Amino acid sequence: MPSVATVAILLLLALPAGAGQEKDDATGDPVEQTVVIRSSRLGGEDAAGMVEHVAISSEEAASDDLPAVVGRTVGVQVRTLGGLGSYGVASIRGSTPEQVPVYLDGILLNAGGFAAVNLADFALEGIESLEVWRGAAPARLGWSGLAGAIVLHGRRPRGRRLEMQAGAGSWSSLRGMLSLAGRWRRSDFLVLGSLLSSRGDFLYLNRNGTLYYQADDRIMPRQNNASLAGNLLLKLHSRLGEDWNLEVGADSFARRQGIAGIDSLPTTFASLKTFRQLLQGRLSRAGEDWAAGLELSLLYLHEDFDDSHTPHGELGLGRQHTLASTWAATAAGWFEYQAGGQSGTARLEGRYENFSHHDQVSDREVPGKDRFALAANYRHRWPSGKRFGLEPSARGELQYSHFPGGPLPGGLGEQQPQDSLRPYWQAAISAWYQPLPVLRLLLSAGRSSRPPSLAELFGDRGSVIGNPRLRAESAWRGDAGLRYDRRLPGNRLGLRLEGALFASRASDLITYVQNSQSSVRPENIAAADIMGVESSLRLELWQSLSLQANYTYLHAVNRSSVSYYRGKRLPGRPAHEAWARLEYRWRAPGHAWKLWLDVDYAGANYLDAANLKEDALARLLLGAGLSFRHRRSGLMLILEVRNLLDTITLADGSGRLRPLRDFEAFPLPGLTALVTLRYHVDWGEEP
């Protein structure tokens, strides 16, 4: 629930309380690769910043979700409201979710009134791989965010394959997928559909709003937390002649879910419907030392928020039923070249956004808000030999935003027509040095910015009063990193060590300030100092045993001009986070096994900006999984268990129990199990 729910949460918190085929070395039988690649490449194409590449394995696609996968990467915090399909947003190096751009196949999804992207609104079956950029992001992306970006790569047509899967698990959860990939003449196509449903009625501790009185505490099932989601993906890749490539795609996602409300005030009827439609086309051509392309995309986002079934609403925000929609159209051209040992990337982009909403209760249509943007960015790379490289990049953008006027939320009058014409810019410079073949060092510094969204400038549906005088959020940042990568002959041992120090100073951060009992207004009153340490490890032994681990230390302090925020820790950013996975793979003629154990630790942290409410206690969660693959039949069985010890409460220093949670008053589930049967059959060679 990217927009209405975000504002609802803010006001509620203010109330009291798979790949191709390869040969197995031991058996000679074909075996499908399911290796999860987690690595940071410093220099080369990734010299602009530190990045973690994650290839989605068959096991993850069948039993995981995107918030969990992204949350396991170093330097990233993902917070959810609890349950399969529940709202989940990411923070990179202490940034806010609104400051994290999310791209799907190169298309920016932060648009109009949807400034933060809900990671739960993506079916993992349709994602082939992802990148999490920390610090500077490459010029090909466009906007890189204040601390990094998340780039999702959808499934691509590969070979001729039919795939089916069905799964069931905790809280009456059901999961299914059907996909068909093939080739016709000089074109490859993919059709994929998936469904996910869950009642979400996990057990949690309801303290009835009395934090220090335990006699009325009780364990009860979560109400009105059901979710039903579906995804349809269509892709076509064609080769036009010898040099041209055409890619077209359509990605549709729909979800209907209940809004459970805060833990002590369960709801019965409040609901949210979301819909996303993405259409895109890409034409590209590659020469001997150059490449160029044109991209067109159309993004439609729609949200139906309904809390009108009772006279005063169930969420404490009054009776509401609002429809909100965003259209975003983008046209871009890019050019890459290499000459004289140097290379460059240029991108020119035009974008149009429209955000509109309708109040169903009062039957009032608010005129749409429009934005036109023209942006250009360029990256150049000077390699001084093979051991040193320098890469500057810059982006400039001009935005014109317009609002014809309309009613203010809560019957507070009329808002006058507003116009805004503003330039924005960001720049970065990176250098890398390789003193040894197995060791690479990186330095990076730059300035990033985030223009206010249309909803922040001109208002949201029913809850946010716009502020046309908002300035762009901005941050100066720097980082220093290293990577050690060593592999012995015969794949007997592989070792990758990575580490980074980072710091940033952000200013003009946008904070929602209570404007009335039922509305908020965004203001540029916040600033923040952020610094931290990232480290990661990957160890592989004989292609059978592997260990992945990462640790992040984050010191994030609010430097707001508001006295009761100044000097406080930024909410939802634990000082210490760690994740590790131990995995064992065993192969035999005709079949293969995989076992894994996860450990996930998050330190104590505050969940409110003033650090006055009860903090979230440190937690240690375990997970485990098992997969069995019968190669010749194409069958695969996956069992995954999260929160293995069924932790739903944590005891504080005085012995009082507190619910497990990421957001104040929104509990997280205990033990979650999902078993999935997957089948595939190939009837042709890989392209």
Image (spheres, helix red, strand yellow):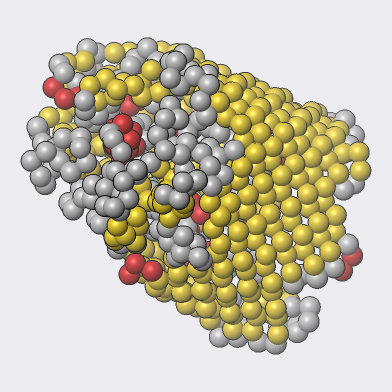
- Residue drawn at x 57%, y 29% as measured from the top left: 556
The count of marks equals 0
What residue is at 16 percent from the left and 25 percent from the top? 410
Tell me the quadrant of the picture where the C terminus can be found.
Answer: bottom right
Q: Residue at x 89, y 65 (%)?
A: 489
**Picture coordinates of residue 250, whole percent (x, y):** 41, 52
Image quadrant in which you'd find residue 359: top left
Q: Residue 437: x, y in percent? A: 90, 46
Q: Nearer the viewer, residue 286 or 42?
A: 42
Q: Residue at point 46% right, 74% down?
A: 675
| Residue 97 relative to residue 687: left or right | left
Give how far across and how far down residue 478 sits, in percent. Answer: 69, 26
**Residue 188 appears anywhere in the view:** no
Relative to 647, does residue 132 appear above or below in the rendering?
above
Q: Which x, y percent locates residue 506?
A: 56, 21
The one nearer the camera, 193 or 559, is 559
Residue 505 can be seen in this image: yes
Looking at the picture, does residue 198 appear above or below residue 379?
Answer: below
Compared with 352, 68 (above or below) is below
